[in-house]
Image (tube, grey):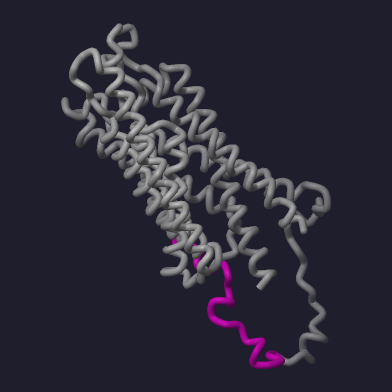
Amino acid sequence: MASRAAIPFLVAMMLLTGVCNTLLTKYQDMQCVRNCDAEDLAKRAYFNQPVLQTAQMFVGEMGCWLVVGLMTLFRRYGPGASPTSNGYEAVNTNDTDDANAPLVSSPADIPKPQEQDPGSILRGPRILLLALPAICDILGTTLMNIGLLLVVASIYQMTRGALVLFVGVFSVVFLRRRLFLFQWLSLVGVVVGVALVGLAGAIYHENKSKVENADEGSPESNALLTVIGVLLIAGAQIFTATQFVLEEWILERSAIEPIRVVGWEGLFGFVVTVIGMVVLHFAVGRTSAGQYGYFDMTEGWRQLTQNRAIGLSSILIMISIGYTLSLLQLTHLLRDHYAELC
C-alpha cells in the first residue's frame, strides 16, 4: 500500500523537477558570455556548452551516493536498529529441524538458474554493465542540449514526448512486452502531436523572421534551424529509450536498488564524459575552428565559473536531476504493482 501511495508523489516530483531542469538549462543558453555590450545583437555570444551541461547532469546523479550513505546510516543507527549488532546477525546453531527436513521437498522447489542469485548480474566487475545505459544517457542528453540551443523550451519539452514511441517499440522487440491496440493508437497520437509541434515551431519562426526583416528586403528564416533542433531532440529519444530499456532489463535481473543504479550511472557517465571532453578539447577545441565551440573545455569552464547566473543555475540543475531518481523509483514501483495485478 505504501508503494501505491508513493506513486502519485513520484509522478508529481518527476514532472516538477523535469520542467525545472528544462527551464534552467534554457536559461543557461540565454546568458551572454562575450561581446555583451555590442549594440548589434547578432554580435553577442551566448552560452553554448551542451557537453558541459551533460557533465553537470552526471554530477547531480552522483549526488545520489549521499542519499545512499544516509540510508545506510539510518538502517544501522536509526530507530529499530540494534546498537550492539553493528549489522551482524548471529547464525542459528540449532540444526535439529534442519537435519530432519528433506533437502528438496519437490521438483518445484528447485530454483531456476536465474533465480539462484538475483543480484549476480551486477556482481563484481559486471557492475560495469551500468556503463551501457550511462553511455546512452550521454549521447541522448548531449543531442537534446544541442537541440535546445535551436528551439524554445516549450518545443523541446513537447518533442521529448516521442520517447514513449521508442520505449514502446523497444519494449516489444527486446523485452518481449505486449502492447494492445489502444496503446499503439496512443503512441501514434503522441507522434502526430510531436510532428505538429515541430511544424508549428518552424512556421512561427519563418513568419517572425519575415516580419523582422521586411524592412531590409532580405528575409532570413530560422525555420531550418528549428527543424534541425526538433530532429536532434526526437533522434535523441532513441538513445534515451535504449537507456530505459537497458535499465529495466537490469533491474529485473538484479536486486540492486534503483537509487544505486542512478549513482553508478552518474559515476560512469561523468568519467566517460570528462574523458571525452579532454580528448575533444585537444583534438578540436584548441584549434582555431573549434575555439569558443562545443568542445572548448577551457572556455566552457571560464564561462561556468565567472558568470554568476550560469554557475547558480548549474547548481540548481544538479539538484533538479533528482527527477532521474524519481523516474527509476516510479518504474520500480509500477513494475511491482503490475506484477501484483497479474
Q: Residue 118 at x, y = what percent? A: 58, 70
How many numbered dots are placed on residues in this image?
Answer: 0
As drawn, 51 above or below 95: above
Asked if one can make out residue 264 in the rendered structure from this viewpoint, the answer is yes
In the rendered image, residue 139 lying in the magenta stretch gets the answer no
Q: Residue 289 at x, y = what percent? A: 17, 28
Within the image, what quadrant is residue 319 found in?
A: top right
Residue drawn 46% across the image and 52% down it: 190
**Residue 319 placement, left or right of 39:** right
Q: Specify start and end residues of the magenta stretch as a single range.
A: 103-126
Q: Residue 36 at x, y = what percent? A: 34, 11
Closer-to-camera residue (286/212)? 212
Q: The C terminus is located in which quarter?
A: bottom right
Closer-to-camera residue (82/144)? 144
**Residue 43 placement, left or right of 272:** left
**Residue 230 placement, left or right of 316:** left
**Residue 81 placement, left or right of 246:** right
